[in-house]
Amino acid sequence: MIRLHHVSKVYGVGSARIPALNDVSFTLDKGEFAVLSGPSGAGKTTLLRLLYRDEWPTEGEIEVAGFPVSDLRRGQIPPLRRAIGIVFQDAKLLPRRTVFENVAFVLRVLATPRREITPRAFAALKAVGLSARAQSYPAQLSQGEAQRVSLARAIVKSPALLLADEPTGSLDDGMAAEIVDLLRDIWTRGTTVLLATHQSGRFAQIKRRTLTLTGGRLVRDE
Amino acid sequence: MLAFLIGEAMRDLRRIGRVGLTAVLLIAISLAALGCFWLLSLNLGRAVHLWRDQVRLVAYLRAEPGSDAVDELVGKVEGLDGVQRVRYVSKAEALTSLRRSLGAQADVVDQLPRNPLPASVEITPDPGHATPDGARDLADRLTALPEVEEVQGGAEWVESLARWQRLLRIIGLAVGGVFALAAILTVTTATTLVLHVRRQEIEVMRLVGASERVIRLPLLLQGTVQGLGGAVLALAALGAVYALVMPRLEPLLTVTLGLPHAAFFGPREMAALLLGGATLGALGGLLAKGRPERW
């Protein structure tokens, strides 16, 4: 599902060169659940952004869901992203749209047939246990609920791969446990999951693979 | 999908409020200015066309020809290149015509000891010669005929009218162009505002894999709607001014230009104005800058 081959990323700020990733290689098979751990600034977010082509590598090759991401032309980026569900720490919900509209919005912009939109959006909300809040606005939700809506929005298009960047970063332990359960459910239904977190202990209950980044290097894969 | 995109465009229009309204008004002003000069030019064009059809040359004869010589002379003139129609006017006919045009003062003619008017030939040039150069050339050739004393008439003033028409068209394009530029910039600003207001939505759209077409189309649509709105306003304003002003101007037009009435735009011109408005708006929507999230 994911293949990184000697990938490096250096940010240029003026004349300064700031290395973010250094010679990272690994492969993640279809159906795996992996946690990308490491302290803040280790390069976890950069690595995820390379995978959905929000950044491009300075060196190395990346392949995601069959797309040669490191050589991807601009017109091929939307198809790549359609294959990936992405969850962020700040749920990135649209404040003027209801919970239902936030989830349905994804299907609408992807030209899903109209008759499929409502049932699929409700199914996604049901999967995260929020169908009763469909008509609420994001401002009326708790942080945990907002993150669950964000998960529903990520899975509504049935992606092959789910990327999550600190999905429990701003949640208390109770809310974080709900999100962990949901991620496990999504994984057990066949979606490959890669999540970046500096709180890998929260995912201890899931039998998973852990990739540890430190200073932009992959120092452990277990 | 189209319904969704149109819905998004309408939602954008509501969000930008006053800026969008300003853009619509500027498009309306630019098209109304353009349309105003266009209407003037259109009617002057009609007058030019009308008067070009009525360009006449009159060749005054040295002596009144006998009845046999009239046909020969008419045939000779008809044979000249650029002549469409020829009418012989005898001395007596000329005097009758003068009497008719004098109306109540026709008695003056009766006081004359003899008919002082010369016989003449009225020549209608064909359309190719109803121009200053064409008419001058024809006049030279008529003057060269031994029977002809003098040639009067020409197409100078019609051409002067045509020059005014061209000038009005240029002024209209220039004024309309300046306003159109301002309108495009305003639509661009309004669309940039839309991009700013929608930055979160656009970010989400890009992240979930929406194509650039889906992201950009609502912007293009809302620009087009603003343009069409402006064009409809401009047409309505021009129509209202025409309905109010024309009844008062028509007598003046009849006297000065010989036009029985002033024409308004036909369906083709109206469609062109609407299309122009839509294009201005669409251009503004297309030119908007602002990409909150890079690829």
Image: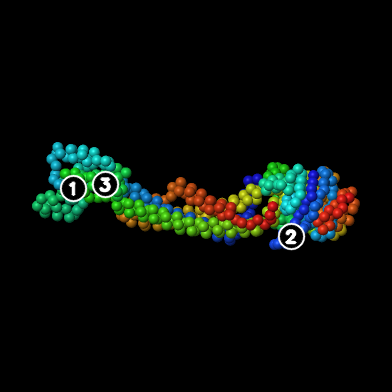
Snapshot quadrant of residue A115? top right
Q: Are marks 3 and 2 in contact (CB under 8 Å)?
A: no
Amino acid at pointer 3 = Asp
Display colour scheme = rainbow
Does residue B79 appear left or right of residue A79 in this picture?
A: left
Q: Distance of mark 3 from mark 2, alpha carbons?
A: 82 Å
User: Which one is earlier in the sequence, the residue at label 3 or at label 1?
Assistant: 1
Q: What is the x, y in percent for residue B241?
A: 43, 57
Front: mark 3 or 1: 3
Q: What is the x, y in percent for residue A23?
A: 80, 52
Q: Distance of mark 1 from mark 2, alpha carbons?
A: 96 Å
Badge 2 element: strand
Q: In this view of the protein, which residue sits in the foreground, B89 or A96?
A: B89
The dot on residue B16 is none
Residue that label 3 marks: B137
The dot on residue B60 is 1
Residue that label 2 marks: A17
Q: What is the x, y in percent for residue A107?
A: 71, 47
Front: mark 1 or 2: 2
Going by the picture, which residue comes out furthest to the left? B113
Residue shown at 77% from the left, 53% from the top:
A8
Is there any visible trace of residue A95 in the rendered image?
A: yes
